[in-house]
């Protein structure tokens, strides 16, 4: 099973709303990622969790707040977003750095298409 | 700064043609290079390359890495309309979980 699931598929929110994006994987991966992808651009890394601890924050504004409640789940809490935050938000997972095997490829979920009005 | 550059950015060919997509990289402590195919939603994993000169194949797709010249190519033979997608190349450096993505090559296969 190489599936990463994300909910919701689509989300429209106002600039004063609070919402959350959810991601789940059952591949036993201990590294999970949030990416933001604008139209016709490659994914841009936002956050990396390794063994449920935040290991990379790519200088993301505080209106995005990640959370990793356990090894299978990753959330992205959204508050006071701007229209320019509208994008496809992708979650991915992989074996973490330092894992004894050789497969570090990241598997992506289908994404949440976010529109901020 | 780590960088991945893909070429061409866009390619239109006829069904049955063979295409070669290019990816060059400059990544500190390079560990591996990955190719993904992205249609409407999530990128789907194609290949991960870690060693020079060893071709990886999956059906009509194949890829090879040259760690001396810092590039990789993705070949698709006997293209089909279902191959139309954006192909993303990404490089992974050591000591971090980051993938550095190229801009992608948008491939269109016309019937």
Image (cartoon, coloured by chain):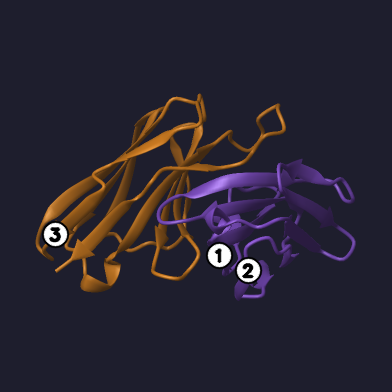
Chain colours: A orange, B purple
Q: Are marks 1 and 2 in contact (CB under 8 Å)?
A: yes
Residue B53 coordinates in the image, percent (x, y): 90, 50
Badge 1 crowding class, 10 Å Cα cut-off, few under 14, some 14 to 19, many 20 or more, is few
User: According to the image, label 2 marks what residue?
Assistant: B14
- Between residue A46 and residue B72, name the one nearer to us: B72
From the image, state whether disc 1 or disc 3 is nearer to you. Answer: 1
Is the residue marked by circle 3 packed among few (<14), some (14-19), or many (20+) residues within 10 Å?
some
Give residue B39's position: percent from left, percent from top.
47, 56
User: Are circles 1 and 3 on residues that touch, CB within 8 Å?
Assistant: no
Tell me which chain the residue with mark 3 is part of: A
Say which chain tag 2 marks: B
Residue B1 appears in the picture as rendered? no
Residue in the image at 59% along x and 60% along y: B87
Residue B65 relative to residue A7: left or right:
right
> Does residue A110 appear left or right of residue B59 in this picture?
left
Disc with the residue nearer the chain's start (1 vs 2):
2
A42 w.r.t. A29: above or below: below
Q: CA distance from mark 1 to mark 2?
A: 6 Å
Secondary structure type for disc 1 = loop
Question: Relative to A52, is B28 above or below?
Answer: below
Q: Quadrant of residue B40?
A: bottom left
Image: B8 above or below B49: below
Question: Which residue position holds label 1?
Answer: B111
Q: Pinpoint the chain carrying mark 1.
A: B
> What is the distance, in whole Å, between disc 2 and disc 3 at their CAs?
42 Å
Residue B18, position as x, y percentages in the image: 73, 62
Please name the residue that numbered disc 3 is placed on: A13
Classed neighbour count for the residue bearing mark 2: other residues with Cα under 10 Å, few (<14), some (14–19), many (≥20): some
| Quadrant of the frame with the N terminus of chain B | bottom right
Instruction: Work out how far the residue at label 1 is from the one at label 3, CA to CA, in angstroms.
Output: 40 Å
């Amino acid at each position: 099973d190489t599936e990463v699931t994300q909910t919701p598929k689509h989300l429209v929110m106002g600039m004063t709303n609070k919402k959350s994006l959810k991601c789940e994987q059952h591949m036993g991966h201990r590294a999970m990622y949030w990416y933001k992808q604008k139209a016709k651009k490659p994914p841009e890394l936002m956050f990396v969790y390794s063994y449920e601890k935040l290991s990379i924050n790519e200088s993301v504004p505080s209106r995005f707040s990640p959370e990793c409640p356990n090894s299978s789940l990753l959330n992205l809490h959204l508050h006071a977003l701007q229209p320019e935050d509208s994008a496809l938000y992708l979650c991915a997972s992989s074996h973490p750095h330092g894992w004894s095997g050789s497969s570090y490829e990241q598997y992506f979920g289908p994404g949440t298409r976010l529109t901020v009005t | 700064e780590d960088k991945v550059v893909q070429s061409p950015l866009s390619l239109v060919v006829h069904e049955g043609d063979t295409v070669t997509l290019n990816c060059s990289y400059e990544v500190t402590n390079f560990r591996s290079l990955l190719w993904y195919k992205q249609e409407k939603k999530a990128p789907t994993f194609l290949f991960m390359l870690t060693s020079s000169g060893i071709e990886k194949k999956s059906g009509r797709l194949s890829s090879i890495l040259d760690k001396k010249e810092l590039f990789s190519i993705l070949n698709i033979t006997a293209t089909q309309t279902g191959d139309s997608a954006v192909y993303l190349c990404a490089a992974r450096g050591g000591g971090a979980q980051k993938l550095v993505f190229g801009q992608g090559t948008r491939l269109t296969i016309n019937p």
